[in-house]
Structure formats: structure tokens, C-alpha cells
Image (spheres, rainbow, N blue to C red):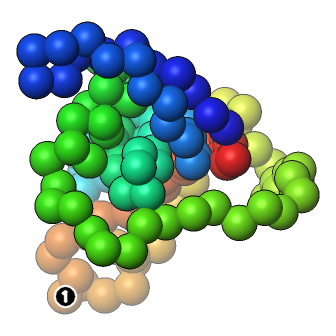
Amino acid sequence: MCLCVFHEHRGHFVLESLTLDSMRWRLRNSSGWSEFDGAASVSEFMTCGFGIRVLVDGQWSFASDNLFQQQPSEAVRKAISLVRAMPRRTRTVMLAEVPPVQATYETHCEQDPFDMPVPEKVEIVQAIMQAMAGVSDKVSKTQAKLYFRREVSRLVTS
């Protein structure tokens, strides 16, 4: 994927052609339920990030960031400035001419844990805690956790 980028380099504005070799975008949802010695906790969070790899004058560079904080165009500028700061190599990289491939992969699960009702999750954790506590009177500390993660990832390469 070829791009033309207008940027500042050493005090001059430059129109430059570069190869955007790849861009990966990832959205991650996580949910956790735990109990430790009778104290329950719940955590849920979401992250969304991206990474960009560029090829400028036969040299690789990479930049990434959290999509909630920065736009991909800023990461491209960062990758260009990083490749400019690297020492020049005698061997340059050229991408192979291969036909594009498009594919999808999904992991099958019988029940989506994100769709489970909260009381059912709490019940599972409590049942595990009771089972551990009933094993022996010598058990002094117990902890049970449920942790779920859903990840959606897209990779685009040139």
C-alpha cells in the first residue's frame, strides 16, 4: 500500500512516498470476577490500539498507540521520524510481489461468557470457594477467579 505523506523534515516540508507495510488494529474487552477470603471484586475494561509498520527508503520502522489517545496519522509521522533517526543500512528491504489473501478466524465457544448473567458468574465463583473451603480445616486462604477476554483484531498488509 503506497502512501504520499506531507511532513516536516529538518525544517523543510517534504512530500514523500512510502510503503505502509502493515497496520494492525485490536479491540480487547476483558471481564473478571474474583473472591479472596470472602471479599468479592469485579473488573471490566476495554482497550483499543493499533500498530503501523512502514518501509521508507528500504528501511523498516514501527509505531503503535492507543486509539483512544492518538490518530493513526500521528503514528505514521512517528514511524517516519524513527526511520530517519536510525543509521542507514547497506542492505535495503523490498517487499515480495505476492497476490493478496483474505481470511477470517473465529474461536468457537459453547456459551459466550460476556452474555452470562451476573448472578450466574457470582454463583460459579462462590461454588468454587465453598468447594475449596470444604476440603480441609487446614485451608486458611482461598481465592477463585473467572476471567474472560474477547479480542477482535484486523491486520492489513501491502
Q: Does 82 sit above or below residue 93? A: above
Residue count near mark 1 (Cα–Cα under 10 Å), binned few <14, some 14–19, many ≥20: few
Q: Does 142 sit above or below residue 35? A: below
Q: Residue at x 31, y 26 (%)?
A: 77
Q: Residue at x 19, y 23 (%)?
A: 9
Residue 16 position within the rendered picture, expressed as x and y whole percent measured from the top left: 43, 26
Q: Does 69 sit above or below residue 23? A: above
Kind of residue indicated by mark 1: Lys
Front position in the image: 79 or 116: 79
Q: Residue at x 63, y 61 (%)?
A: 95
Residue 12 position within the rendered picture, expressed as x and y whole percent measured from the top left: 18, 14
Q: Which residue is mark 1?
A: 138
Front position in the image: 67 or 47: 67
Q: Residue at x 18, y 71 (%)?
A: 141
Quadrant occupied by the N terminus: top right
Residue 138 position within the rendered picture, expressed as x and y whole percent measured from the top left: 19, 88
Q: How many marks?
A: 1
Front position in the image: 76 or 153: 76
